[in-house]
Image (cartoon, grey):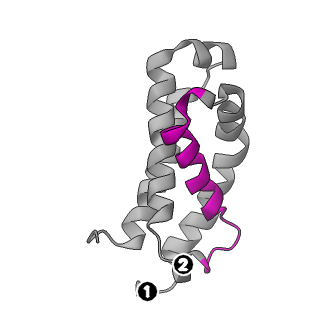
Amino acid sequence: MSSRTWKLRVRDILIAIESIRQRTSGLTYEAFSKNETLVDSILYKYVVIGEAARQIPEEIQDRAPDVPWRLMNDIRNVIAHEYFQVRLDIVWQGIHEELPLLVEPLQRLLESEAED
């Protein structure tokens, strides 16, 4: 078992979200989808998000029920195991519609109760 704490894993998620935001800011979907290096780096960040979410204990996840913990891991699994079935339009939509909604509840979780 890793010695990384759940708070570090939540920070990993927040850092990955910010990295995705910075790398895609000002881009169109067309520019994003045609840049293989960028797409690969964004998909890797999604894997980081899912892996970090998977490692956060259930009792901690229960403190933030508005965070789609299971979905984050499911997305990671699709990217890691079914790479050629990844739909970039859905990834793009997630970048702009879903990821921003995770920031506030994750920050609240970090600021909440002391680490167990």
Q: Secondary structure at mark 1?
A: loop
How many discs mark residues in the rendered view? 2
Q: Position of residue 51 (x, y in %)?
A: 45, 55
Residue furthest toward the left?
Answer: 3
Q: Is residue 74 visible?
A: yes
How dense is the environment of label 1, judged by Cα within 10 Å: few (below 14), some, or many (20 and up)? few
Instruction: Identify the magenta region.
Output: 62-84
Residue 44: quadrant of the picture: top left
Residue topped by disc 2: 58
How dense is the environment of label 2, judged by Cα within 10 Å: few (below 14), some, or many (20 and up)? few
Q: Position of residue 75 (x, y in %)?
A: 60, 47
Q: Nearer the viewer, residue 18 or 79?
A: 79
Q: Which mark is residue 114?
A: 1
Compared with residue 59, is residue 68 higher up or lower down, i.e. above or below?
above
Q: Position of residue 23 (x, y in %)?
A: 50, 29
Instruction: Specify the quadrant that holds the C terminus.
Output: bottom left
Of tags 2 and 1, the one toward the viewer is 2
Q: Which mark is residue 2?
A: none
- Which SS type dominates the magenta stretch? helix
Q: Nearer the viewer, residue 38 or 78?
A: 78
